[in-house]
Image (spheres, coloured by chain):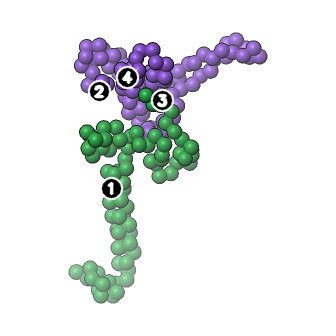
């Protein structure tokens, strides 16, 4: 098919924005899914070794953008026992 | 709507006697989103674990009690309390 190889793409340069947009979308989707799988505080891949995965977020930020509070100064208020 | 747990502090001599300081469960960065169900359940479990480890009279355990009484629906607290009494609570406490 035309446009699937580099040489035919040079002859149809209008396809380049299509590649850019679809590529960004795919990369974004894969990236976010992997981020959720590995970083989400509710996800635990090994329930016997990591039964409460949210505890590692007691002093750091998970949200991408959080203008409301400065997480660098935050510590979970729960007492340790 | 955030639940309120009233905490009556001793009024200083310059204030009116009926000043009540209202406060609620503090923000916990482990549960930063709108769904606070885990905060409720974790506090409930932490309270009973703290009591199991430190005994019934350990004061800092009451922090967890204040939090789960604020965050958890009363029906849940009642159900879990009944389950604990009947020794069939599903969470890990001991």
Marks 2 and 3, how far apart at CA: 20 Å
Q: Which residue is disc 3 drawn over?
A: A79
Residue B91 image label: 2
Q: Do marks 1 and 2 share a subunit?
A: no
Callout 1: SS: helix
Provide the residue designation for mark 1. Answer: A34
Q: In the rendered structure, are the residues bearing label 1 and label 2 in contact, judged by CB atoms less than 8 Å apart?
A: no
Pointer 4 local density, CA inside 10 Å: few below 14, some 14–19, many at least 20: few
Could you tell which of marks 3 and 1 lies nearer the N-terminus? 1
Q: Nearer the viewer, residue A28 or A59?
A: A59
Residue A38 position within the rendered picture, expressed as x and y whole percent measured from the top left: 33, 51
- Image quarter of the C terminus of chain A: top left
Chain designation of label 4: B
Give the number of the mark in front: 4 or 1: 4
Q: Is residue A66 above or below residue B86?
A: below
Which chain, by letter, is green? A
For this rendering, which residue is in front, A63 or A24?
A63
**In this rendering, would B11 be left or right of B49?**
right
Is residue B48 visible in the rendered structure shown here? Answer: no
Q: Which residue is mark 4?
A: B53
Where does residue A66 sit, x and y in percent of width and height? 52, 48
- The reply to whether label 3 and label 1 mark residues of one chain is yes
């Amino acid at each position: 098919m035309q446009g699937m190889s580099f040489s035919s793409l040079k002859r149809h340069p209008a396809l380049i924005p299509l590649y850019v947009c679809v590529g960004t979308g795919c990369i974004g989707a894969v990236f976010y899914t992997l981020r959720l799988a590995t970083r989400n505080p509710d996800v635990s891949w090994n329930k016997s070794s990591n039964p409460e995965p949210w505890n590692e977020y007691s002093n750091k930020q998970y949200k991408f953008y959080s203008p409301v509070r400065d997480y660098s100064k935050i510590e979970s208020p729960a007492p340790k026992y | 709507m955030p639940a309120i747990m009233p905490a009556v502090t001793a009024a200083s001599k310059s204030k009116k006697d009926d000043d009540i300081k209202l406060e609620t469960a503090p923000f916990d960065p482990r549960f930063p989103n709108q769904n606070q169900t885990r905060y409720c359940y974790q506090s409930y479990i932490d309270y009973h674990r703290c009591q199991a480890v430190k005994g019934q009279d350990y004061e800092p355990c009451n922090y967890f009690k204040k939090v789960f009484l604020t965050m958890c629906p009363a029906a849940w607290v009642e159900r879990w309390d009944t389950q604990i009494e009947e020794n069939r609570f599903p969470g890990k406490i001991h």
